């Protein structure tokens, strides 16, 4: 039984990753330094770099290349957040004003570009074609996922399958890359690489499903951003899709109108319908099923404290309230 919190197992390594992040943020352009430090010090959970470290630990590969890879993954994640907050016109993230709210859309997009391109410079340092291959195709898929999501906005006919395709691409793919890279850095068999990649993918799906539940169920204080953001943007996430399918005709019509028009005026009615149709319970069930598959995949990874920590992370990801 793992005695400590799962991330404490890689706390020392994470300190090295944080130092690397700070070091590689540096630029002669003052605004990049300012914004970069603001974002990376704004209290992110560092879940994805931790996954690189835990997977690398499970594969006896916890070395400087693992640190670099973990920092790359966090840079890519941070670049996507910067761009996402511009696309969604979000004003609050991690309980703080977003970069776009403070410095404007242009600066936020461009500093996202800086982080993204810096991550490619760091990939060259890792000097491994497989690592390059995985990270370049992953970022390409993330961008595709975000475009697919854009096409679903205000479309009340978005199906569960289309929603799942979006979350696979925009979120699960980066989790998958993080854990797959641990195996690649450790030179592990394709079977073990597949197991760790499958674990990451299912964990990422579960994580996003809970994210979409929390948009309706959490408190603003816990979440660090406004509740009901998805509805305001007309984003058809699974709680809405399910509620439309299982509500009365009138309830389905109201949710359809809310998705098509967006805005915050529908939030109370929609919350009530979500509650009545148990739509978030269903979404949690789907997340639970993803979590189960993540745990199953881990069985093909040799037992270690790192594997156990990855197992604990699955539970934490589905039981979280922020
Ligand atoms: C720059 C490659 C590139 C692509 C841009 C905008 C975009 C395309 C992609 C957005 C993808 C995105 C933001 C997905 C949501 C993922 C998600 C659940 C983010 C929140 O993750 P947490 O809770 O964040 O781990 P913290 O704050 O802890 O770091």
Image (cartoon, rainbow, N blue to C red):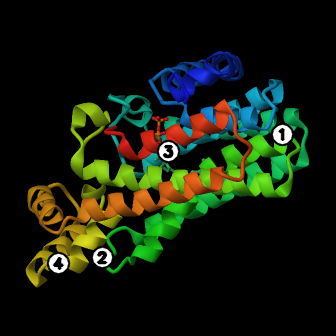
Q: Nearer the viewer, mark 2 or mark 1?
A: 1
Question: At 49% from the left edge and 59% from the top edge, which residue is drawn?
Answer: 290
| x, y percent for residue 62 | 78, 27
Please state which of residues 133 and 58 is positioned toward the viewer in this rendering. 58
Q: CA distance from mark 1 to mark 4?
A: 49 Å
- Asked if ligand 1 lies within 8 A of label 1, the reply is no
Question: At 63% from the left edge and 41% from the top edge, which residue is drawn?
Answer: 76
Label 4 sits on residue:
252
Tag 4's secondary structure? Answer: helix
Q: CA distance from mark 3 to mark 4?
A: 33 Å
Q: Nearer the viewer, mark 2 or mark 4?
A: 4
Q: In which quadrant of the rendered image does the N terminus lie? A: top right
Q: Nearer the viewer, mark 1 or mark 4?
A: 1
Label 2 sits on residue:
156
From this viewpoint, is residue 74 visible?
no
Mark 2 touching mark 3, by CB under 8 A?
A: no
Please state which of residues 187 and 225 is positioned toward the viewer in this rendering. 187
- With 192 as the anchor, is 12 left or right in this view? left
Tag 1's secondary structure? Answer: helix
Q: CA distance from mark 1 to mark 3?
A: 23 Å
Q: CA distance from mark 2 to mark 1?
A: 43 Å
């Amino acid at each position: 039984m793992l005695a400590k919190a799962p991330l404490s197992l890689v706390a020392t390594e994470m300190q090295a990753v944080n130092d690397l992040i700070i070091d590689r943020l540096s630029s002669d352009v003052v605004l990049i330094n300012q914004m970069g430090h603001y974002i990376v010090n704004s209290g992110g959970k560092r879940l994805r770099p931790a996954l690189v470290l835990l997977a690398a630990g499970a594969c006896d590969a916890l070395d400087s290349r693992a640190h670099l890879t973990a920092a790359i993954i966090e840079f890519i994640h941070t670049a996507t957040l910067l761009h996402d907050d511009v696309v969604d016109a979000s004003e609050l993230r991690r309980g703080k004003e977003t970069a776009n709210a403070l410095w404007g859309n242009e600066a936020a997009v461009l500093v996202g570009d800086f982080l993204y391109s810096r991550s490619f410079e760091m990939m060259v340092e890792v000097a491994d074609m497989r690592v390059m291959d995985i990270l370049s195709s992953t970022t390409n898929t993330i961008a595709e996922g975000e475009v697919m999501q854009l096409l679903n906005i205000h479309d009340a006919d978005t199906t569960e399958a289309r929603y799942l395709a979006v979350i696979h691409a925009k979120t699960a793919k980066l989790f998958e890359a993080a854990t797959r890279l641990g195996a690649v850095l450790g030179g592990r068999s394709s079977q073990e690489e597949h197991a760790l990649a499958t674990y990451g993918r299912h964990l990422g799906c579960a994580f996003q499903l809970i994210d979409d539940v929390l948009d309706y169920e959490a408190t603003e204080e816990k979440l660090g951003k406004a509740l009901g953001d998805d509805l305001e943007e007309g984003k058809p996430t699974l709680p809405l899709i399910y509620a439309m399918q299982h509500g009365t005709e009138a309830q389905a019509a109201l949710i359809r109108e809310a998705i098509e028009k967006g805005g915050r005026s529908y939030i109370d009615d929609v919350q009530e319908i979500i509650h009545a149709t148990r739509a978030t319970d269903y979404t949690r069930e789907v997340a639970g099923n993803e979590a189960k598959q993540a745990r199953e995949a881990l069985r093909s990874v040799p037992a270690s404290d790192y594997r156990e920590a990855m197992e604990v992370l699955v539970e934490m990801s589905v039981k979280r309230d922020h």
